[in-house]
Image (cartoon, grey):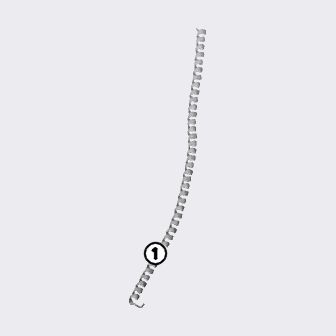
Amino acid sequence: MSDPMYSQILQQLNLIQQFLDGNIAQINAMSQSIENMGKTFAESMASLSENMRLIIEVVKKGRLNLSESVDDISNQMNEKIAKLWEEKTLEAITKKEIEAIKKLKDINKLVSDNLYMSQLMSIIQSIREITGRALTHKMKNNP
């Protein structure tokens, strides 16, 4: 068995065995790398999923808060509008009433003035009639 050919075949088989062992080691290393990458990928996906869940929660809360804020602002605006409406309506009614009272006072003054003038005219008319009768009576008595 010390044949040179046998030793050459044995040497070549050893080289092939070493080559295959190297390939197996590389395949094992690649398998380990792929496994590590898969594990890292799975962890990254889990982290990404958790981050997405948190972002969605923040967006939901933000939307709810925005909705509540808009509702609060809307309610406040409605209250202010109602208050202003009431105040301005009362103010307008008051102005209209004041104008009506002024008109009534003016009309009352005119009526009072007209009545006064009418009474004066009546008195003057009565004085004329009395004076006319007195003159007529005096002329009858003093021909």
How many marks do you count on the picture? 1
- Splitting the image into 4 quarters, where does residue 99 fall? top right
Instruction: Assign the C terminus to one quadrant of the image.
Output: top right
At x 42% / y 84%, what residue is drawn? Answer: 13
- Tell me: 132 left or right of 34: right
Query: From what the image shows, is residue 90 above or below residue 117?
Result: below
The quarter of the picture where residue 134 lies is: top right
User: Which residue ends up furthest to the front in the rendered image?
Assistant: 1
Q: Position of residue 9 (x, y in %)?
A: 40, 85
Q: Secondary structure at mark 1?
A: helix
Amino acid on which disc 1 is placed:
Met
- The residue that appears at 58% across and 18% down in the rendered structure is 125
The image position of residue 48, as x and y in percent, is 51, 65
Q: Based on the displayed image, in which of its 4 quarters is residue 132 positioned?
A: top right
Residue identified by numbered label 1: 30
- 94 and 143: which one is in front? 94
Report x, y in % for residue 49.
Answer: 52, 63
| Front residue of this view, candidates 139 and 15 | 15
State the quadrant of the N terminus: bottom left
Q: Residues within 10 Å of mark 1 (few under 14, many from 20)?
A: few
* Nearer the observer, 32 or 43: 32
- Residue 121: image x %, image y %? 57, 21
Instruction: Name the residue furthest bottom.
Output: 2
As rendered, which of 115 and 105 lies closer to the eye?
105
Asked if residue 77 is positioned above or below residue 2 in the image, the reply reads above
